[in-house]
Amino acid sequence: MADPKREELQVKAKRAILVSVVSPSNHIDKDQALDELKGLVETAGVKVVGSLVQNRENPHPATCLGKGKLDELKQMVKHVDAELIIFDNNLSPSQGRNIEEETGTVIVDRSELILDIFATHAKTYEAKLQVELAQLLYFRPRLKRLWTHLERIEGGVGAGRGPGEKQLETDRRLLDKRVAELKRKLSEVERRRERTVSNRYQQLTVSLVGYTNAGKSTLMNALTGADVYIADQLFATLDTRTRRWELPHWGEILLSDTVGFVRDLPHHLVASFKSTLEEARQADLLLHVVDSSNPEVEHHIKTVNKVLNDIGIDFKNAILVFNKTDKVEDRSKLDVLRLKYDNAISVSAVSGEGLDRLSQAVIDRLASGYVIVEMETPVGNGKLLSQLEEHSLILSREYSHDDTRVTYQARIARRFLPMLKTGPDTELKIHDDQPPVPGDLIPEESVNKY
């Protein structure tokens, strides 16, 4: 079903030319765009033997490149003996097919390259399912391109359907069957994940999000003392990892690390990884980690915010963290960023600079999102009591002398207050005048341990 030439992309290095069509209106620096593409291909194990950039407002509908640049590319392929042409752009099936025919070389666009990297780095059962699903959805409209050579040999006008066309129909049926199977398996995994996440309602969760290679895993290790895998390459982390983080004067919370984002992340990949990003969706707070030493730092911020918004995660519920300050050579640029993003925290996960300030900022934000409630209700009010116990941290529980009524004191997120539907037999007091200050309001012996 797959093109054998494409299978080799995953198992050995290839000589590749990098191509980028840059629109001036996108405000993306062409050198930075190529640098990121080089980082992607190096992660994939591909050897770069040439590059070509065209400034063009709109890609050519048939070949992405204009005629002059396409001719230049054809000459470059011969000169450097290239085996692959990798585009920084996402190509339509027809564009990929046309460029392949013009150059006689295998074409890989940005989406296929990222999918290949994800396939290489996927380690867990869930990640492998997600990547395979995204790959199949990507390749389905491109199957015809893989069988063009057989159609030319056996097909033809008036000749009926050749083996290439028949195989194409078979491949589509097999692919659709596998897609349905993968969706079913992922649905099962997602249900298990939702149960796991929902069982943590009484445990506060902070989730790390950010552009790939922003240093999220290094920051997690620095904050939690964990030893999660770190590599100076793109998409080193594909699976969500959760570790316990002891906040001073607050107590233990959970810190989750998620897959990194990147410009023009393939749509099918984002959709497939929605369940993995469920940790971020359910988190009480996000830490948006940014590589402050990267020249494209502001573009990275916008990219991450867009992806979060596209998958229904409120990016405003985040603390912006400028990481890698130890790598910033011109400190005045960091000062400019701090002025523009005045609520951001600057840290170095390597040197430890700013980590105390980050911890305090997290405590302040968590405290502002919670209130202390005091509720007195009949002990038989099972539904209300179960809602309170499921969605809050119980600080104390006292029964009346005749055991018919119970008074709870609990810490609860403001967003869950509407769920506490009380009747005339229940008295609910919300202590909203002061946010819950950790340590002062929560005796160590009364905190539920999870």
Image (cartoon, helix red, strand yellow):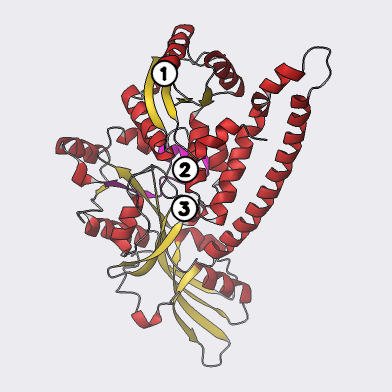
- Residue situated in front as seen by the camera: 304 or 326: 326
Q: Are marks 3 and 1 in contact (CB under 8 Å)?
A: no
Q: Which image quadrant for residue 413? A: bottom left
Residue type beneath disc 1: Ser
Q: Is residue 438 left or right of residue 122?
A: left
Q: Residue at x 70, y 49 (%)?
A: 181
User: 424 or 321, which is in the foreground?
Assistant: 321
- For badge 3, the amino acid type reads Ala
Q: What is the secondary structure assignment of the residue under circle 2?
A: helix
Within 10 Å of disc 2 (Cα), the crowding (few <14, some 14-19, many 20+) is many
Q: First in sequence: mark 2 or mark 3?
A: 3
Mark 3 highlights which residue? Answer: 280
Q: Is 30 positioned to the left or the right of 77 in the image?
A: left
Asked if residue 8 is positioned above or below residue 129 in the image, the reply reads above
Q: How many marks?
A: 3
State whether residue 275 appears in this view: no
Helix, strand or loop status at disc 3: helix
Q: Would residue 356 be found to the left or right of residue 209 on screen? A: left
Q: Is residue 307 above or below residue 371?
A: above
Start-end of magenta stretch: 303-323
* Residue 242 in picture, x, y percent from top left: 43, 61
Q: Position of residue 140 (x, y in %)?
A: 66, 33
- Numbered tag placed on residue 23 in the rendering: 1
Quick one: label 1, few (<14), some, or many (20+) residues within 10 Å?
A: some
The answer to whether marks 2 and 3 mark residues whose Cβ atoms lie closer than 8 Å is yes
Of the two numbered discs 3 and 1 in the rendering, the one whose residue sits closer to the viewer? 1
| 85, 225: nearer the viewer | 85
Instruction: Name the residue tied to disc 2.
Output: 308
